[in-house]
Amino acid sequence: MAEMEVKSGGGHKKGPGVKKGKKLSTRVDLTPMCDLGFLLITFFIFTTTMSQPTAMNLMMPKDTDKPDETNKVKESGALTIMLGKGNVVYYYFGLDPTKMQTTGYKDVRKIILEKKKNTPADDFFVTIKPDKDATYKNAVDMLDEMSINDVHRYAMIDPTKDEYTLITMTEQAGGVH
Amino acid sequence: MGRAKIKRGSTNVDMTAMCDVAFLLLSFFILTTKFKPAEAVSVITPSSVSNKHAEQKDAFTVSIDKEGRVFIDMTDEMKGDVIDRISVDRSLNLSAEDKNLFKKSIFVGSPLNQLSSFIRLSPEELKKVKLTGVPADSSNNELQSWINAAVNIYSGRTINFYIKGDNNAKYTAFKNVIDAFKKNDIYKYKLITSPEGVPAGSELEKVNNETILNGK
């Protein structure tokens, strides 16, 4: 404790001529020190960021040439989402890329959910095709969108040549740089 | 009238105990805080709703910065084993000193033929020098050799493969990395992301709520 015990009046007696020294209190006010302690604690707590990064599982399929090992996608359940330059999303239902429509990352959720609602769960399949100009963030966002919307069947592959031409044409028409 | 005299108690409270607690907590927080390990390059990761923590054990991290350069980071234990293996695989003729320096280096950020000069760079020099990164394109895929070395040396042991990409990295750079993994028959890896809340009213939220309700 802060106060030290000062033994008063030890064994020996002081002579009559010896002046009794005034006893000073050894008690120290610890309030400021306590304040400082808590101030530092608050400071450390607020400046420490919980920087534990999270990890997202990604499983890619093995490349195969054998046709029986590939997954068949039903036309009625297929949704293809292509990620283009400048955070633009292109999508089409079924297998015909010419019916491509344009949207953004904010609205794509609605489209996925609507398609999900209208198709039997076993037929629903999303194909994600990021093109050369898409960023890594775009790809991760889209994979994240799959987990947000609880889509279990999806794949990430490259766009075909036709699809790529279509994207480039739309980009030029829309003036996306 | 005889009024009872109220004894005035002292308002001084002994702060010693409180002060002790404060400093105890302070030392606890300081000692338990781990410093963020030095970053290979500045990589701003995209966010995801995933809430799984990235494990540090046997981690093999491939970072992609915004210019598409690729860097490899491994645990210290792994570094020692992998450098032995890759110097045999690629007949690099690295000296024991080189290998030791390699273990101490923070990350791998140069092609194999410049490796011995790269590991001699001091942390200050690392910041100044324009690093080339590990070549990962199809013409000279050294990333593939690194992964191969790690897989061979730790066969039978699970390595946690991580990909840490920058928001603005091009998808092609990411694809090169995936291809390098694919060539080594690795199809399962994790993407390092920063945490993000699950959007309200989304399907995932419903699924999460159900699992909580079912007490799973």
Image (tube, rainbow, N blue to C red):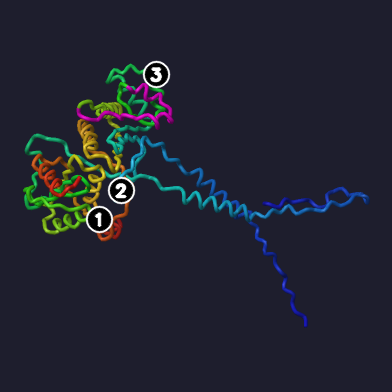
Q: Which mark is residue B204?
A: 1
Q: Would residue A31 appear left or right of B43 to someone viewing this image?
A: right
Which region shows up in magenta? B114-138
Q: Secondary structure at mark 2?
A: strand
User: At label 2, which amino acid type do we have?
Assistant: Ser
Q: Where is residue B152, by image quadrant?
A: top left
Q: Which of marks 2 and 1 precedes in the sequence?
A: 2
Q: Seen from this angle, which residue lies furthest bottom?
A: B1
Label 3 environment density (alpha carbons within 10 Å; few <14, some 14–19, many ≥20): few
Q: Would residue A145 appear left or right of B96 to someone viewing this image?
A: left
Q: Residue A71, percent across and down?
A: 10, 43
State the residue position of label 3. Answer: B96
State the residue position of label 2. Answer: B47
Q: CA distance from mark 3 to mark 1?
A: 52 Å
Q: Are marks 1 and 2 on the same chain?
A: yes
Q: Which of marks 3 and 2 precedes in the sequence?
A: 2
Quadrant (top left, top right, bottom left, bottom right) of the C terminus of chain A: top left
Instruction: Please say whether residue B1 is one of the residues in the magenta stretch.
Output: no
Q: Residue A25, percent across and down?
A: 75, 54
Q: Residue at x 30, y 48 (%)?
A: B47
User: At label 3, which amino acid type do we have?
Assistant: Ala
Q: Secondary structure at mark 3?
A: helix
- Name the chain letter of the residue that bears numbered label 2: B
Q: Which of marks 1 and 3 precedes in the sequence?
A: 3
Q: CA distance from mark 1 to mark 2?
A: 16 Å
Marks 3 & 1, CB-CB < 8 Å contact:
no
